[in-house]
Amino acid sequence: MAALLLGDRINARQALGMVVSLLGNRPHRRRPGRWPSACFGDLLSLLFDALVWALLLSVIGRLAMRTRSALAATGAAFMLAVPILVVPAAWEWTRQPPTWTPTLALTVLYIGVFPGALALLAWNSGIRRLGPGRAMAFYNTLPLYVAILAVVFLSEPLRWTSLVGGALVIGGGLFAAREAPGRGK
């Protein structure tokens, strides 16, 4: 999207790093009797999510940060998103109102602050520093964070395939984001 809409070029190093990083996110096999890990709906959801992320949060974010800081762009994103999300939230609450508990309140607060605000601010800072093409290599780290959280909080087993996949994701992202030798920023 950045190459098409902003004229950002993707060089061979970035392309190779992105492919290596994507290889680390291969679907995992499930034990017999469990649902398949990659179904058509999941694939469509992933593709749609990546397209929306690339367009809204990377390309448009880069355009916004030409004249604003990463903090201002993050604030603008929240100001645009909240009114859009109020309608579906209100509809869902009429269907199934939440039962507020201290745990639920802390969960909502945590999601709003950490994965919501701070993660988006970090992403916008990366877009501002690296540009969308180089920063997108790190988009593949999202499943890695989910796997780490599953090991820590859900006692999921840490398998060697997860370690190799994580190394490919991080290594590919770093390789793609690294400035080519002899080129200063």
Image (cartoon, rainbow, N blue to C red):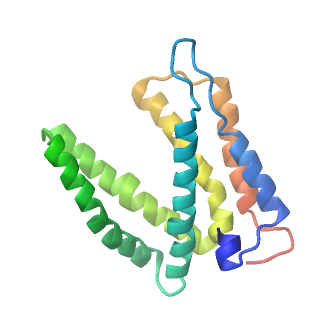
Specify whether 53 is left or right of 85.
right
Residue in the picture at 69% in, 45% down: 22
Q: Is residue 26 depicted above or below 161 in this figure?
A: below
Residue at the farthest top position? 32
> Which residue is at the front of the view, 146 or 6?
6
Q: Is residue 132 depicted above or below 149 in this figure?
A: below
* Labels in figure, total: 0
Residue in the picture at 51% in, 73% down: 61
Visible residue check, residue 116: yes
> Which residue is at the front of the view, 155 or 34?
34
> Which residue is at the front of the view, 84 or 171?
84
Residue in the picture at 67% in, 47% down: 170
Residue 109, percent from left and from top: 25, 51
Residue at the farthest bottom position? 67
> Which residue is at the front of the view, 77 or 17?
77
Residue 84, percent from left and from top: 30, 65
Could you tell me which quadrant the N terminus lies in?
bottom right
Residue in the picture at 49% in, 80% down: 64
Residue 70, percent from left and from top: 47, 74
Residue at the farthest front position? 40
Residue 4, percent from left and from top: 69, 73
Q: Is residue 6 depicted above or below 103 in this figure?
A: below
Q: Is residue 140 depicted above or below 73 in this figure?
A: above
Could you tell me which quadrant the C terminus lies in?
bottom right
Specify whether 40 is left or right of 179.
left
Answer with the quarter of the image where residue 179 lies. bottom right
Visible residue check, residue 144: no
Answer with the quarter of the image where residue 82 lies. bottom left
